[in-house]
Amino acid sequence: MESKIGVSEQQFTGLILVSGVDSPGITEALFEALSPFAVTILDIQQVVIRGRLILTVLISLSPAHAKSIEADLEECAAKLGVDIATSFESSDQSSIAAKKSLLHVVVLSQSLKPQAINAIAAVIAQDGGNIERINRTASYPVTAIELTVSGADLATLRSALATTGSELGVDIAVSPGGLARLAKKLVVMDVDSTLIQQEVIELLAAKVGVEKEVIEITNAAMAGELDFEASLRARVALLAGASEEILEEVRSEIKLTPGARTLVKTLQKLGHEVAVVSGGFTAVIEPILAELGITNYRANNLEIVGGKLTGQVLAPIIDRAAKAQALRDFAAKTGVTLEQTIAIGDGANDLDMIAAAGLGIAFNAKPAVRAAADSSLTAPYLDSVLYLLGITREDVEAANI
């Protein structure tokens, strides 16, 4: 029967809280005690931490049965050696119904302090939000905690928590709940200092003895004295005359960022798409991408004539605008909406891509990139991105058996 407008239907409910040392059979015994009564289970939450059980059950029942249920549960608690507390009251059905427009707040830290949770909870409350649930999703190599929040605005909370995370030195991501969180994703990554630990142009420069000059040009670009294309062409010009054999030498020296392989393989096994967009060079990264099974990529092409580098870069140049366009193109190709794209990068050349994506992640990035991104990762593990997407450590390990 529908309730009258403006009148809330009341329901008599009982909240049962079980706590104590965990052992097999506790849940079975609890519900065996409830079975003789005409009750309906409305909600259940259970967690075991360091061998201690906390189990909460919300039931609807007849008020006439409350005292009998309470007595039977006290007897059950005595047999099990646990504590069982009960609370009975009439509740507005709207307070029991599932919350809508939930947000997920993921907090990552290598050393999570109570001050961080305190500050995050305060920001959520100030934005009008309420924390409905808290779960640990990973304990290594970082601690990941996920808070499910109702009543908060996505953009407002994301902005406020980005500031809080920066101040506290923890990584925080805010994403919408619902079916969108389960949708197919496209993750697009930068290469240098993101997918891999090094900067390829600097490795090449070291082979021909011009590393100092290349770093000076890079610094000038970072200072705003040169744009990316001008700095790229100036650095590559210093490689003129070098044997193409240095490309193979550099490939053998490249090291993947810790967690990179796990990130890529887990996403692929879960049915998501992975792509790469780099201001570096295809001749160096293609074998690495082939090994990882990444077929969607764009990078710059070095001109090679007679087995030697000419010092020229072939058009088109993959600059920051081209990176953003590549993300859009890959999204269209793979059938993923822009809202379901994730861009990961560390430098100014990634800013347009990060802005275009549904979720922009700054990975051990420069301050300007962290300020522009939706979320920032400071831990040196690239697979931490998985926790920001709601994927647990257990899921990761199961996907990579």
Image: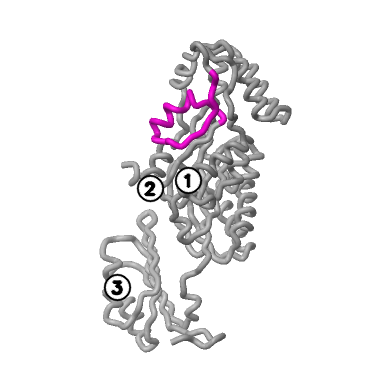
Identified at 34% across, 80% down, the residue is 39
Q: Which residue is mark 2?
A: 270
In percent of width and height, residue 334 lies at 45, 45
Q: Answer with mark 1 or mark 3, whichever residue precedes in sequence.
A: 3
Identified at 45% across, 60% down, the residue is 179
Q: Residue 22's image quarter?
A: bottom left
Q: Which residue is mark 1?
A: 186
Residue 297 within the segment the image draws in magenta: yes
Q: Nearer the viewer, mark 2 or mark 3?
A: 2
Classify 15 as above or below 164: below
Q: Residue 19's image quarter?
A: bottom left
Q: Amino acid at mark 2?
A: Leu
In percent of width and height, residue 216 lies at 67, 21
Given contact means CB atoms under 8 Å apart, are the residues at marks 2 and 3 in contact? no
Q: Which residue is mark 3?
A: 31
Instruction: Please name whichever residue, 96 or 347, is drawn nearer the observer in this view of the structure.
Output: 347
Secondary element type, mark 3: helix
For the N terminus, which image quadrant?
bottom left
Q: Answer with mark 2 or mark 3, whichever residue precedes in sequence.
A: 3
Residue 78 image label: none
Q: Which residues are magenta?
A: 279-303
Separation of residues labelled 1 and 2 (CA atoms): 12 Å
Q: Amino acid at mark 1?
A: Leu
Q: Answer with mark 1 or mark 2, whichever residue precedes in sequence.
A: 1
Separation of residues labelled 2 and 3 (CA atoms): 35 Å
Given contact means CB atoms under 8 Å apart, are the residues at marks 1 and 3 in contact? no
